[in-house]
Image: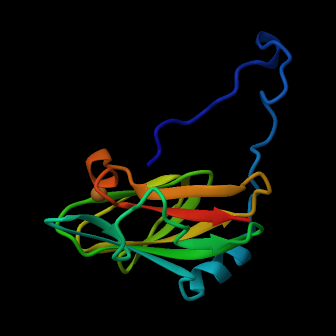
Amino acid sequence: MVLADMVSAQPSSLKARPGLGGAPVYASFPPTVLKRVEASEPQFVVTFTEDKQGFYINGQKFEMNSGPMLTVDVGSLHHWRVMNPTREVHPFHIHQVHFLVYRVGENPVKDPVWVDTVNVSYGSSVDLVMDFTDPIIRGMSLFHCHLLSHEDKGMMAKILFR
Ligand SMILES: [Cu+2]
């Protein structure tokens, strides 16, 4: 979800420090490129489920010692779908990566924005363009439901970036 719009201050009011100001570190993509990814079949589907024993992603409860659920080669955009067949909302969140929410259920999103968390309504789904292009993305990472009581009971998975 969008938490804030950042506006840079007058440069003269800032001490010269690397990392302040300048363009965002992530790339922007031509509409034709985004449309091609959006129209493709999902490369990965995240399904949130739960029962009396816990909370799951793709039927798996998070284990600290488990390997990654998937491995992604950094350098491209992917189409992901997140499905929520449960009876409560689950906010999808992923570390290191931002994504464009372009469809909710069957409905295209007007004016999609890049975010790192999105609420997935119960009985619904979201379609995302995952931006795996930033070369700074590396190593073992996580995606999970952003409700602590859910992620702590297993609604979390590892993703390996290489
Ligand atoms: Cu949840």
The quarter holding residue 21 reads: top right
Identify the residue at the far front of this view. Answer: 65
x 34%, y 66%: residue: 61
Residue 158 in sight: yes
Instruction: Identify whether 73 is placed above or below 19.
Output: below
Q: Position of residue 7 (x, y in %)?
A: 64, 30
From the image, which quarter does the C terminus lie in? bottom right
Q: Is residue 103 left or right of residue 134?
A: left
Q: Quadrant of ligand 1?
A: bottom left
Instruction: Identify whether 15 is placed above or below 104.
Output: above
Q: Is residue 39 left or right of residue 85?
A: right
x 62%, y 51%: residue: 96
In this rendered view, identify the residue nearer to me: 110 or 54. Answer: 54
x 63%, y 72%: residue: 71
Residue 98 in sight: no
Identify the residue at the far bottom of this view. Answer: 41
Q: Position of residue 19 (x, y in %)?
A: 80, 30
Q: Is residue 61 left or right of residue 20?
A: left
Q: Position of residue 160 (x, y in %)?
A: 63, 64
Q: Position of residue 119 (x, y in %)?
A: 35, 57
In this rendered view, identify the residue nearer to me: 122 or 59. Answer: 59
x 45%, y 56%: residue: 64
